[in-house]
Image (cartoon, helix red, strand yellow):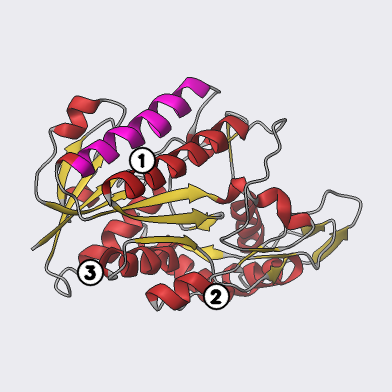
Amino acid sequence: MKKILVFGANGAIGRYLVDYFYERKEEHNIELITADLSGSQFLEERSEFHQVDISKKEQVDSLPKDIYAIIDLATIMPARMKGFDPKLYLDVNIGGTFNVLEFCKNKNVNRILFAQTFGDILCRSEETPELKVEMTPLQDYTDSKSVYITTMNTCVELIKCYHGLFNQRSFIFRLPTIYSWNSKPYFEEGKEIKRAWRILIDQAIAGDDIHVWGDPNRKKDMVYVKDLCQEFYKATFVDKDFGFYNIGTGVGTSLLDQIKGFIEVFGGDKKSKILFSPEKPNAPQYIMNIDEAKWDLGYEPKYFFLDMLRDMKKEMELNRL
């Protein structure tokens, strides 16, 4: 029996990941243990749930023993923060990760998997759209997310320390925007907003006109949560001591093709007209290089853009997550 402990299990990514592992529990004789600030029936049906704040050492230490792997998705991120409280980034991201690493060391956990932001290298994408694992951080300290990114970089360095000092098997994943159908609130600059892609889907469903802002040919790696789950799953059982990987498909989809896809998959009888607004700001551009994940883990993305949208529509209709 391999006990796998997932921190941040009730989040937008966490629920999909728990579901992915649960559906494959017989392959590796998996027992799922989940932890988060709050639970849900979804988790309780699939795992042994514990209410835990990772910034509280005593709560982390109270978790079950004999854990094979820890998947840490519990860091605080701007998209989930109402208002702006940078101390939370320090307490939860750095302090919480330290508590989890100490738990790993003291309880002989075989490995830790950690979700890092791609914000550390995103600034490089304007000059080099393909983002590679080995790129060194380049940060815009005037960006409102800079404190968050700094704490996440510190978490990565702490994990490397525990790998070097205590031979802690460690796997770090750099995450771009991960797409999934879920009901979790989303925040920008501390204020709750509707995500741009959800607005585009709503417009496609209604048959409203859709405006393409800026350069329609800029490409973005549209990464579905279920491909992330595959990569994490493979790393949980791979015979390696350390790995640093990008989460992605390795393929870019232009903004224009994204909008055409939203209309094709979500549109009804009344199809949206596409209008161009070149005077508006450009969308981000980036493609995640996934060579290391392919070589080490045997990872192959299964959800390219239209595949993702079709599966997302199924999840929307099921309304289970």
Q: Is residue 99 magenta?
A: yes
Q: What residue sits right under mark 3 in the picture?
A: 23
Q: Which residue occupies the extreme front position in the image?
A: 165
Q: Amino acid at mark 1?
A: Ala
Q: Earlier in the sequence, mark 1 or mark 3?
A: 3
Is residue 126 left or right of 138 when viewed as pictured? right
Q: Is residue 50 left or right of residue 146?
A: left
Q: Which residues are magenta?
A: 86-105
The image's mark for residue 74 is 1
Q: Amino acid at mark 2?
A: Phe
Regarding mark 2 in the picture, which secondary structure is present there? loop
Residue 308 visible to an observer of this rendering: yes
Type of residue at label 3? Glu
Mark 2 Cα shell of 10 Å, populated few (<14), some (14-19), many (≥20) = some
Residue at x 14% of width, y 73% of height: 26
Indicate the position of residue 125 as horizontal and vertical percent values: 72, 57
Q: Quadrant of residue 25?
A: bottom left
SS at badge 1: loop
Nearer-the-camera pick, 124 or 23: 124
Q: Earlier in the sequence, mark 2 or mark 3?
A: 3
Tell me residue 116's x, y (percent).
48, 48
Tell me the tag on residue 27. Answer: none
Residue for badge 2:
304
| Mark 1 vs mark 2, CA separation in Å | 27 Å
- Residue 80 magenta-highlighted: no
Q: Is residue 38 visible?
A: no
At a point 57% along the width and 51% down the height, the residue shown is: 118
- Asked if labels 3 and 2 touch by Cβ distance under 8 angstroms, the answer is no
Distance from Cα at disc 1 to Cα at disc 3: 22 Å
